[in-house]
Amino acid sequence: MDQVSPAPFSSADFRARFAAQPDAHAGDEYGDHRFNPGHPRLNQGKALRDAAVLIPVVDHEGDATVLLTKRAEKLRNHSGQVAFPGGTIDPTDPSPEAAALRETFEEIGLGDDRIEIIGRMPDYVAGSGYRIAPVLGIVRPGFELTLNTDEVDAAFEVPLRFLMDPANHKRDSRMWNDLEWFFYDMPYGDRRIWGVTAGIIRTLYERLYA
């Protein structure tokens, strides 16, 4: 009997696409420099700080979603922006995966008992000076979140189908010290997914769906 292929944009299809990658987190570094070659913001002589984020793909059978957060408006850096749960890798974190899980629980109360880590994507180098390890996780639905209001104002889900559609990947820019800085922008309803988060989503599309 022929094996039935998983439904497009399901968590099973997502898992199969990732498994088909020979080494999905290896290869050229991705990052803001790909959209801004030679930009002086990228050459400030400072060592990159290591961080990790979780890309939480929620297993809603045929149509998976991706869980995102809106950073608290009161934060000093990147306030109000849409982000993946995550943060700086601490010296006590044994791995980027452990850091992503720790930060996810601290930010939104989603425990690792509901998350299956399936691997990582290539590191993403941000213009803000971070080298970010994007950790992929399949999340069992039915969870209840507890938001850390010092860090997160909201959490919401976006269909994987929407995020992996290149028609929704717009190019935008803003001025930085009188120079233009380019990035991806993926508006979804009243949410604006842009910058590093959109760049990581674009990486995911290029590696698994393009």
Image (cartoon, grey):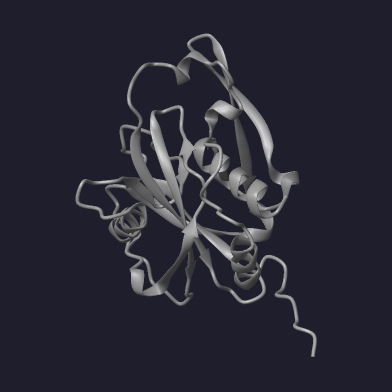
Residue at the extreme left: 92
Up-down: is 154 above or below 178?
A: below
Q: In which image quadrant can residue 179 be found?
A: top right
Q: 75 left or right of 126?
A: left
205 left or right of 84? Answer: right
Q: Position of residue 76 (x, y in %)?
A: 31, 32
User: Residue 23 appears in which quarter of the rendering?
Assistant: bottom right
The answer to whether residue 72 shows anywhere in this view is: no
> Residue at 31% of width from left, 58% of height from top?
98
In the current view of this chain or complex, which residue is farthest to the bottom?
A: 1
Judged from this view, the residue extending furthest toward the right is: 2
Q: Of residues 39 and 83, which is closer to you in this image?
A: 39
**Which quadrant of the structure image shows residue 8?**
bottom right
Please say if 179 is above or below 18: above
The percent coordinates of residue 3 (x first, y second) are 75, 83
**Camera-nearest residue between 81 and 121:** 121
Name above or below for residue 150 compared with residue 28: below
User: How many badges with numbers are in the image?
Assistant: 0
Residue 23 is at least partly visible in this image:
yes
The structure residue drawn at horizontal position 46% and vertical position 27%, both measured from the top left corner, is 127
Rendering coords of residue 141 (x, y %) = 48, 75
Of all residues shown, which one is farthest toward the front? 22
Residue 107: x and y, percent?
A: 32, 55
Tell me what residue is drawn at x 60 percent, y 50 percent.
204
Q: Quadrant of the N terminus?
A: bottom right
